[in-house]
Image (cartoon, rainbow, N blue to C red):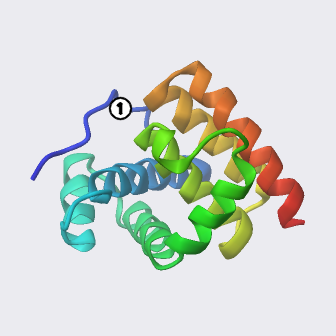
Amino acid sequence: MSSFRASPSPRKSSSAGKRHQARELALKVLFQLEGSNDDPEEVLRYHAAEGAATEESTNFARELVSGVLTNLEQLDSILSETSEHWKLDQMAKVDRSILRIAIYEIAIDRKVPTKAAINESIELAKTFSGDESGRFVNGILGRVAATAL
């Protein structure tokens, strides 16, 4: 099984830190699953063990992965509508995965404040894809948030 390698982020003990760890875990899982036939639960367990994720973080990541996979068509439709001048297949795979998680949280799940979902996504984009991606993600999610209200 191939794995997604990136620099680990600092561990935080707060609830926000656990959610950040969960989003990072969900990103790694969704990144690996795109274009593969791997079992989502197996991939999640693999990356959770590799990153020493807590049970709480793993469970939250599982909810995110399941939500994104279940709603993928709707998420991609929203993403296509709000990403002016960008087709889904032109986006970096990591950016697309980050955006799907955030759009799921903002437009479908609605359990976290929109601002928190956007800020987390920007941080993930900067960490895993670079500063330009952070700006790209911010711009698209700003449009998603404006239409999701």
Depth check, front residue: 27 or 51: 27
Direction bottom: furthest residue: 70
- Give the class, few, some or many, for how many residues have Cα within 10 Å of label 1's Cα (few <14, many ≥20): few
Residue 13 seen? no
Depth check, front residue: 26 or 100: 100
Q: Residue at 64% across / 56% down in the picture?
A: 79
Quarter occupied by residue 66: bottom left
Q: Residue 23, how many percent across, how many down?
A: 49, 53
Q: Residue 74, how many percent across, how many down?
A: 61, 73
Direction top: furthest residue: 131
Total numbered labels placed on residues in the image: 1
Direction left: furthest residue: 1
For mark 1, what is the residue? 8
Q: Residue at 47% across / 79% down in the picture?
A: 70
Residue 57, above or below 124:
below
Residue 118 seen? yes
**Horizontal arrangement in the rendering, residue 143 relative to residue 4 (left or right):** right
Q: Residue at 53% across / 37% down in the picture?
A: 124
Q: Amino acid at mark 1?
A: Pro
Residue 89, above or below 6:
below
Q: Residue at 72% across / 57% down in the picture?
A: 81
**Horizontal arrangement in the rendering, residue 58 relative to residue 118 (left or right):** left
**Horizontal arrangement in the rendering, residue 145 relative to residue 7 (left or right):** right
Q: Residue 25, how many percent across, how many down?
A: 38, 52
Q: Residue 48, how many percent across, how many down?
A: 27, 56
Residue 91, above or below 141:
above
**Horizontal arrangement in the rendering, residue 121 relative to residue 37 (left or right):** right
Disc 1 is placed on an element classified as loop
Quadrant where the C terminus is found in the figure = bottom right
Depth check, front residue: 36 or 117: 36
